[in-house]
Image (tube, rainbow, N blue to C red):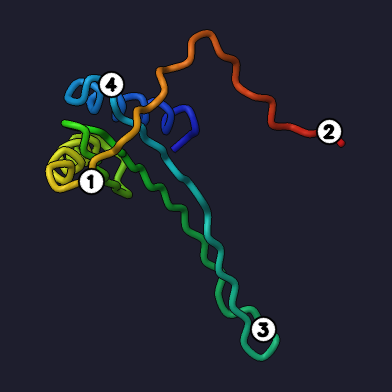
Amino acid sequence: MTNKNLSQKLDILLTKASKVTAGKADASILSGWAKEIDFEQDKLKLIKGSKSVIMDLRLFKNDKIGVSATNKIDEESIQEVVGDALDVSGFGHEGGFDLPSPAKNTKSPKLFDPS
């Protein structure tokens, strides 16, 4: 899955969460690779790679925090994450803080350092 696709899934998650929490939600997607290489008696025995993706949501409902996460990035899982976070918020701690409003007209930071 490309970064653009992951970003679109994140937007869908936040849109669904915002509908039930009046915009009081934040989310993230973490993506990574794992590589395993095994040698036995100086001979290559195994090369294995895997990719993992984790999507998580934190929302505030009635001033209580609810969290949920999944490693499945599809429409059904997105809906389940929102539902699970809502369910958990009934038992969550009071947040005691507000999330900042979305920034307007911001540019992405430049992350490349040529030095």
Give the number of the disc on residue 43. 3
Relative depth, front residue between 103 and 75? 103
> Which amino acid, by three-letter code, is at mark 1?
His
Quarter of the image with the C terminus is top right
- Mark 2 element type: loop
User: Mark 3 or mark 2: which is in front?
Assistant: 2
Give the number of the disc on residue 114. 2
Q: CA distance from mark 3 to mark 4?
A: 56 Å
- Report if the CB atoms under discs 3 and 2 are less than 8 Å apart: no
- Mark 3 element type: strand
Which tag, 2 or 4, sits closer to the chain's start? 4
> Which amino acid, by three-letter code, is at mark 3?
Lys
Please say if 101 is above or below 105: below
Q: Which residue is mark 4?
A: 23
* Classed neighbour count for the residue bearing mark 2: other residues with Cα under 10 Å, few (<14), some (14–19), many (≥20): few
Q: Residue at x 58, y 80 (%)?
A: 45
